[in-house]
Amino acid sequence: MSLFYNILLIVLWNLIVPILIGYLITKFMKSDDKNNIAINFLIGFIVMLGIFQPITLIAIYLKVSLTFLTMLVKLVWGTLSIVSIVINHKRIFVTMSHVTIVLKKFNIYLFGALLLIMLQGYSYIAYEHIDDDDAFFVATATTAVANDNLYVKSPYSGVTYKNLPDRYILSPFSIYYAVMSKLTLVHATVYAHLFLPLVLLLFVYMVYYLWGKEWFQKSESLGVYLVLISIINIFGNYSEFTTQSFLLFRLWQGKAFLAAGILPFLLYLCYKTRKEMEYLFFIALFFGTLAASHVSSMGIFLAPLLIGCWALVDLIMTKKLTRLFCYMLCCLPSILCGLLYVIIS
Amino acid sequence: MFQIGWQFVQDAYQIYTSNGIIQLLLIGSFIIILINDKKEENIHLVYYCITALVIILFPPIAFVFGKYFIGESVYWRVFWLMPSGILIALVLTKLLERINRRYQKQLFMTAIVFVLVLGGKNIFNSNNYSKSTNYYKLPQEVIEICEMVAPNGSNTKMVVPETIVSYIRQYNPNINLLYGRNLGKDKQKGKKYKILLQLNSSEPDTKYIAKYTKKKDCKYVVFDNSSIGIEEIEQYGYKLYGVTDSYTVFKLVE
């Protein structure tokens, strides 16, 4: 298959399908932002990962093949996308026609921000940062594809596992690489190291964009803000453990995506629930904690900690117990994963 | 408990923040929002940050989190809860918005960029990145060795030095390895560990290596070119099969 065909498949499964799923969720929103393509992409992507998490955990438990899992999630994601097209086609068309309005607001600062973001994307295309953790994360995906099974063989040596890696099994982001590799017909390592970071970088900057939209009405200010955050990221290597370093070194790894993308998005969703009292954001938050637990075992703990801190302040400021209850419900996936971890370890 | 927790906090802070100025700018941002901002949700955001900081920096809590939930050596990851970059950029832009005169605005913007650049450290430097030579983003020599021993993704079993052990199965998962990454870290005993020590030593015991690798059906043994006396393995059933810039590959012929 040609590279062009692979890129079309990557665009389909990593951009178009998440956007369509996002439209399905935002269909029922009252918020003015429901037609914003960025929020639809982000919610859709999070929901895709959130749906993928329980399906994958059950698939690992039942020892089904990777091919079966791929068919199943293809069916689920595909059905949601088609349903979305059927019920949202007018709204999608209207949103697309708004692109020209957005382009008219383009200014020198937004252009500068775009250049800086493209520079960061270019670093992922033309350069490499080799990380030994991929001996597990990426090789788990290649091993799954080669053997058509899930966590049966050790990615380190290829021998059959005696004991499953309980630390990682509840956050099987590597299986996501494997499924995407099968859906896009790209080698799992090429997908993880080349294409996935570009998709996730887009995710991260869309989160920043949404934060900027909340604070600034003028597109010039939005541009300045995006320029500044790009500079903060590019010059954020004062330690190799900062969010910025993780963002630009190894975004394909779940923990990096958690730090740079998912946690800031969860915080954004919390911020929106506070600002607009829109309960549908709680649903996105629920899928967000599922996604956090999917990408990294650290997400099982950090996502509820983030929501817990926000909820505590919320309770003190608003004194609304129903909101606290909603926040607690959003943490359920993490609590369940934590309990499962205790049981299997 | 308090002392250990305090140690976790100190180590985490030192590892994460190092000598950057982001933390100072973050505290400045809190103050500016609390003084100037009237929007409840923005104040909520600052209170969230303060609450999270109090929780993660309080030694007894740090002890419990570090020991039972996150991990002592990676406690610094709790700082990921701080939306530092987002908040700093938002506040700086808000300050810029307040300046009406164009030249003052440009001057302030230049000053901000100057502080961020000088106070931080550029990620894009040669210590962090190298020009990629393939779409896999793996060392080119690994691909050469994999294609040499198992062309087009075929099967085989081999043993390689630790320097490339992490990458072989990322390229070709049909190649089984005698030992994988972290063997020496997880388990420092047993025959595999002895092979690891020998294969990665400057003067490997080729007789010992050949005896064990043959027993384990390793079709190929890869040595670092800098190791001395590796050609002696030819006396024990292996023949020179190929050479790359840094590695020499021997194939089992018996």
Image (spheres, coloured by chain):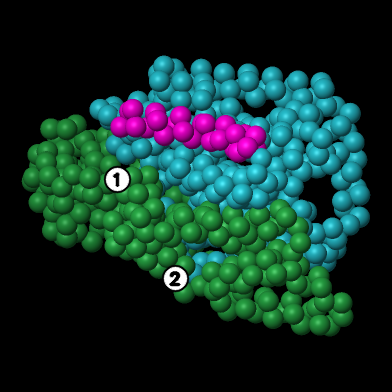
Chain colours: A cyan, B green
| Chain identifier of the residue bearing label 1 in the image | B
- Residue at the image point whose x is 33% and y is 27% from the top: A343
Query: On the rendered structure, is B75 left or right of A109?
Result: left
The answer to whether any part of residue B167 appears in the image is no
User: Secondary structure beneath disc 2?
Assistant: loop
- Residue at the image point whose x is 74% and y is 40% from the top: A277
Query: On the rendered structure, is B4 left or right of A123?
Result: left
Residue A298: x percent and y percent? Answer: 44, 44
Q: Neighbour class for label 2 at 10 Å: few (<14), some, many (≥20)?
A: some
* Same subunit: marks 2 and 1: yes
Q: Is residue A131 within the magenta segment? A: no
Residue B43, label in figure: none
Residue A309: x percent and y percent? Answer: 55, 49
Earlier sequence position, callout 2 versus callout 1: 2
- Residue at the image point whose x is 73% and y is 55% from the top: B40
Q: Evaluate if marks 2 and 1 touch, with contact meaning CB atoms under 8 Å apart.
A: no
Query: On the rendered structure, is A233 left or right of B56?
Result: right
What span is colored magenta in the figure?
A: A321-345
Q: Is residue A333 within the magenta segment? A: yes
Quarter of the image where the C terminus of chain B is located = top left
Work out which residue is located at the far front of the displayed protein and give it.
Answer: A319
Residue B31: x percent and y percent? Answer: 64, 70
- Residue at the image point whose x is 87% and y is 80% from the top: B101
Relative to B67, residue A66 above or below: above
Identify residue for label 1.
Answer: B181
Label 2, label 1: how many angstroms apart (C-alpha)? 29 Å
Identify residue for label 2.
Answer: B18
Quarter of the image where the N terminus of chain B is located = bottom left
Residues A314 and A184: in front is A314
- Name the kind of residue labelled 2 in the image: Ser
- Name the kind of residue labelled 1 in the image: Arg
Residue A221 in which image quadrant: bottom right
